[in-house]
Amino acid sequence: SLLENVLAASKPGHYASLGEAPVLHEAAARAQAEFGPDYLRGLASDPEALARHQGGLQEALAVAAKQAEVVSWSSSTTGYGEKNTVYLTKWPFVFNHATLAALLLQDRVRIIHSRRDLRDISVSVFMENFKHSEPLLWTFDFQGIREFFRGYLQLMQHLDAALPPSIFTEVWYEELIHDFDGTLTRLAAFFGTGWSSADARRARRFHVLDREVLMASRDQVRQPLYTKSVGRWRGIDDVGMVKLFQDLEVLQPACEN
């Protein structure tokens, strides 16, 4: 949510947020209904079906853009949409559909793997009062958190190796906090756009955007940039959580904070 809001604030009219639009989840459901669990292979081997599902995703994006009251999605223009608008969308667990997005949108998609120290994430999800439902049951116990992050990292490592760097990159939360301008300059190059001092000034005012945020990080994006959430795990001495932190440190790459 933070990165999405920062980008949307930096270039109004160029970055357009679709919010938590579940367009990729719905695209995956349509493909699975036709091809079963191995729908990626099915789509890749059937050009006619691939074209049909590409059109379905284009239509879903157009609907999401209209609902979000942003510039209408255009499937006929070069780039990301009308006047090369970059449409930003996110949703919990959307990383599961990154390969589908690359297959259906091809060189028109840009995938940002937004990362953060897993130890800080574990604190946030364990302390958040999520609804006790199937998608989030893993947040209620330490073993569930371990297993979820293990599977998530395995998938993302695969995507990093399989997808070209022209459409896939990663940004660390800690990097964004400590090198705000440098991180956004790099992202602007990833999107093929320029970056100016005016863009940077607007980006730092992300917290005044008048838009709905439904995610658990909703309070974060209503405040100016702060560093208090970096290394939050260090202040916790619960025996179970300390063991969890040790296990997660082994799983993830070195994270300086």
Image: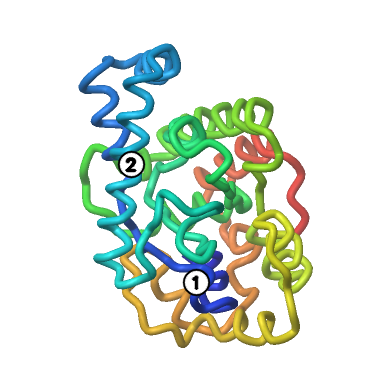
Q: Nearer the viewer, residue 187 or 146?
A: 187
At x 40%, y 34%, the residue is 144
Q: Nearer the viewer, residue 125 or 34?
A: 34
At x 76%, y 44%, the residue is 254
Query: Label 2 sits on what residue type?
Result: Leu
Q: Nearer the viewer, residue 220 or 171?
A: 171
Q: Position of residue 49 (x, y in %)?
A: 32, 21
Report the residue marked by disc 2. 57
Taking the image as shown, residue 81 lies to the left or right of residue 197, namely left
At x 71%, y 72%, the residue is 180
Q: Nearer the viewer, residue 197 or 214?
A: 197
- Could you say which quadrant of the image residue 31 lies in? top left
- Rate crowding at label 1 as few (under 14), some (14 to 19) or many (20 or more) other CA atoms within 10 Å: many
Examine the rendered structure and indicate whether residue 141 appears above or below residue 226: above
Q: CA distance from mark 2 to mark 1?
A: 23 Å
Q: Position of residue 135 (x, y in %)?
A: 29, 39
Q: Secondary structure at mark 1?
A: helix
Taking the image as shown, residue 208 lies to the left or right of residue 169, namely left
Examine the rendered structure and indicate whether residue 230 appears above or below residue 77: below
Q: Position of residue 139 (x, y in %)?
A: 37, 44
Pair 2/1: label in front: 2
Toward the front, the furthest residue is: 76
- Rate crowding at label 2 as few (under 14), some (14 to 19) or many (20 or more) other CA atoms within 10 Å: many
Q: Secondary structure at mark 2?
A: helix
Position of the C terminus by quadrant? bottom right
Query: Label 1 sits on what residue type?
Result: Asn
Q: Which mark is residue 5?
A: 1
